[in-house]
Image (cartoon, rainbow, N blue to C red):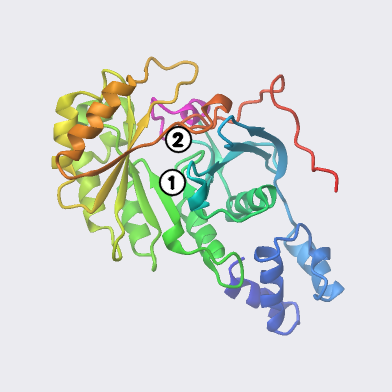
Amino acid sequence: MLPAELSAWVKSAGAPGYRAEQIFRWLHGQTVAAPDDMTNVPPALRAALAAEHPFAPLTQTAVQVARDGTRKLRFATHDGRSIESVLIPDDDAERDKLTLCVSSQVGCAMDCGFCATATLGFGRNLTAAEIVEQVYRATALAARRPTNLVMMGMGEPLHNFDNLTRALALLEHPWGAAFSPRRITVSTVGLVPAIERLGKISPAPNLAISLNATTDEVRNEIMPVNRKWPIAVLLDAARRFPLSHGRRVTFEYVMLAGVNDNDADADRLPRLLRGIPAKVNLIPWNPFSGPRFTRPSAERIRTFQERLRTSGLSVYIRSPRGDDIDAACGQLAAREQLATIAPWRPTAS
């Protein structure tokens, strides 16, 4: 519940209004696992909360650790679904950055041809509680708070708009985790009406767009959403997205050999992005079983990057992180891998 909703519930339970702040701080500041842990809340109010709003926490079922320190967390939901989150440390230890990739759905309905999550189909939307709990569980596991949250795990965040924005409000509230919107990025394949709705949130989070092609012909083939909102319409929405000083729209570009990595693509991309404060992340395709795609050579990717840079674009190559545990971009699928993944258990104190 948002603070106003919690306040209304507290009053309906016959308790003074200040109890709402106490409960919210326990839930989102101390991240307690059960009402009985709220030691300064009266037992009767704790019992009423448990009865009317029963906790349905995620169950952490596995943690995998990659060679580069990336950790993939697997959770089971109350109805037996599997979802995954990814903790990504920065290559540069001096920056002390820790990014958490958060899932918003079980599976995904967008059917992008290069993404493992698409192979699962759509299961259901995650609730706001299930979204924020991934953050709290990852924080506990890492013994530190992530510096950056990216809503680009399993699912299309803007396809679950109401629960996503409720989760953002919970995560940003000063009584709780108090994340800055500048530290939260929402990624989308290009749901144009939802991008416009997201821009009306004040303050809006950062926006990342999974573009991955420079022509409608290619994008239609690898990203079916483009048939409804083609590139020109999508980029018009990006131009209208409100950006405070110094902020840019991030364009993710998954590089697929022989599909979207030629010189003509590199020449078209800057023209498409003209007028948008933008940066481009080039993502070498992370393979998984099934698709026909291959990753371009490192030389081809660097050549593509340099060609974009000559136009003045800020362009970065995103090194695959956690690809040895299927935790890299586009690889999350939450399939059972009982032969290789040991159940997580807390370390003995």
Mark pair 1, 2: CA separation: 9 Å
Task: Give coordinates of residue 343: x percent, y percent.
Answer: 76, 32
Instruction: List the residue tagged with mark 1.
Output: 159
How many circles with numbers are drawn on the protein? 2
Asked whether 7 falls inside the magenta stretch, the response is no
- Local packing at callout 2 (Cα closer than 10 Å; few below 14, some 14-19, many 20+) is some
Asked whether 115 falls inside the magenta stretch, the response is yes
Residue closer to the observer: 223 or 54: 223
- Local packing at callout 1 (Cα closer than 10 Å; few below 14, some 14-19, many 20+) is some
Residue under the point 42% across and 17% down: 291
Which image quarter: residue 240? Answer: bottom left
Task: Give coordinates of residue 129: x percent, y percent.
Answer: 62, 55
Would you say the residues marked 1 and 2 are in contact, meaning their CB atoms lie under 8 Å apart?
yes
Mark closest to the chain's N terminus, 1 or 2: 2
Residue under the point 28% across and 35% down: 226
Task: Give coordinates of residue 171: x percent, y percent.
Answer: 55, 62
Asked whether the viewer can see residue 232, the reply is: yes
Query: Image quadrant for the N terminus?
Result: bottom right
* Residue 212 in the figure: left or right of residue 341: left
Q: Amino acid at mark 2?
A: Ala
Task: Give coordinates of residue 308: x percent, y percent.
Answer: 20, 36
Provide the residue span drawn in magenta. Answer: 110-120
Instruction: List the residue tagged with mark 2.
Output: 109
Callout 2: SS: loop
> Which circle marks residue 27 in the picture?
none
